[in-house]
Image (cartoon, grey):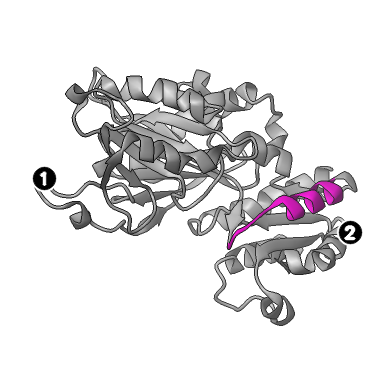
Amino acid sequence: MGSEEHFRVAVVCTGDRRLRDTGLPADHRLMPVFHALREQGMIPEAAVYHDDFAGEVREQLMAVDAALVWMNPIQDGRDRSILDSILREVAARGVFVSTHPDVILKMGTKEVLYATRSVGWSGDVRLYRSLAEMEEVLPELLASGEVRVVKQYRGNGGMGVWKVELVDPAAGVGGHALVRVRQGRRGCFDEVISLADFFARCAPYFAKDGRMIDQAYQHRLPEGMLRCYLVGDRVAGFGHQERVAMYPPPPGAPPEAAPDPGPRLYYPPDMELGQPLKERLENEWVAAMVKALDMRPGELPLLWDCDFFFGPRDGQGRDTYVLCEINVSSVAPFPPSAPPRIARALAEKLKTR
């Protein structure tokens, strides 16, 4: 292990053998983190990971003081099961791991929307532990004219996130009823299929103890999404995206006319639009989430983010917010204001361990 003044920090990210052998390029998206760590007197090193050379990465992580991990839960047909086993092992040996796999299971799956519903930020949310349960409950919601968004338990990039509504609620909700569906991945557009076919598409999400989360669709979605980046329990910056993957097509236009998602623009924590949400997070919601998930405040990731849609305005015309998801596995890219805060928080943790 390193001395107090020169902690060794492994920055874990996905890559192939060539990238591990050559090192990260100067323009890699995580380079700002390397620079910020050095400014705090730490010694960062790249830990390029792939299951094919997991043993090498394990040995590397055993020799450092901390591991910052940026890896998607699902990528190129692989999951994080081997990596997470290594991270649990090195954490048990005294290496600081952010984010610990056990914390990811609490915070970083779509089920967090249901588990933290008492916080008041999830809107109308349901949990389906089986396809049969979804087949029983979802048709009733659709029959009432509701538009719902159902999401697989773990995933990224909009995979397994579906907007669904009945084409004709008056026609009933039998298996032959037609529904309009759209997946939340870039380039997808509305399709009209039978409700039975939609359930068949969702069946694989329930494999291996999988489940699905069901939320009411937010009709202010065309106003965009606000992403809050947090270091521990403090907001470190914002990302604002005016068009997201489920942005609707113009009235009367064909489904494929829906505009592509727009860029996410990044802002520091004093961004004016984000101040009401920042106040709710720092003074109320984060602490309530920690309690609801039976966590300790010190377990919060060094960097995580939460995505919010604009909910219905309240009686005074003020914005409300509805949580879409929390990201803790691979929170990148991020605003320029985040890396210095990450480095300072890590230095403080390592000095007090």
Mark 2 Cα within 10 Å, few/some/many (few <14, many 20+)?
A: few
Compared with residue 266, is residue 275 higher up or lower down, i.e. above or below?
above
Image quadrant for the C terminus? top right
Quick one: SS at disc 2? loop
The residue closer to the viewer here, 145 or 349, is 145
Question: Does the magenta segment cover residue 279?
Answer: no
Q: Which residues are magenta?
A: 76-91
Q: Nearer the viewer, residue 266 or 253?
A: 253
Residue 257 point in image, percent of width and height: 18, 56
Q: Nearer the viewer, residue 38 or 32?
A: 32
Q: Which residue is mark 1?
A: 251
**Location of residue 148 in the rendering, given as x and y in whole percent from the top left corner:** 34, 31
Q: Amino acid at mark 2?
A: Ser
Name which quarter of the figure residue 163 lies in.
Answer: top left
In the image as oriented, which residue stretches furthest toward the front? 176
**Which of label 2 and label 1 is nearer to you?**
1
- Amino acid type of the residue that numbered disc 1 sits on in the rendered structure: Pro
From where the camera sits, is residue 257 visible? yes
Q: Magenta stretch: dominant SS?
A: helix
Residue 325 lies left or right of residue 63; in this view the side is left
- Which residue appears at 69% of the width and 78% of the height? 23
Residue at figure coordinates x 59%, y 46% from the top left: 328
- Would you name the residue on which mark 2 appears? 3
- Residue 118 lies left or right of residue 41; in this view the side is left
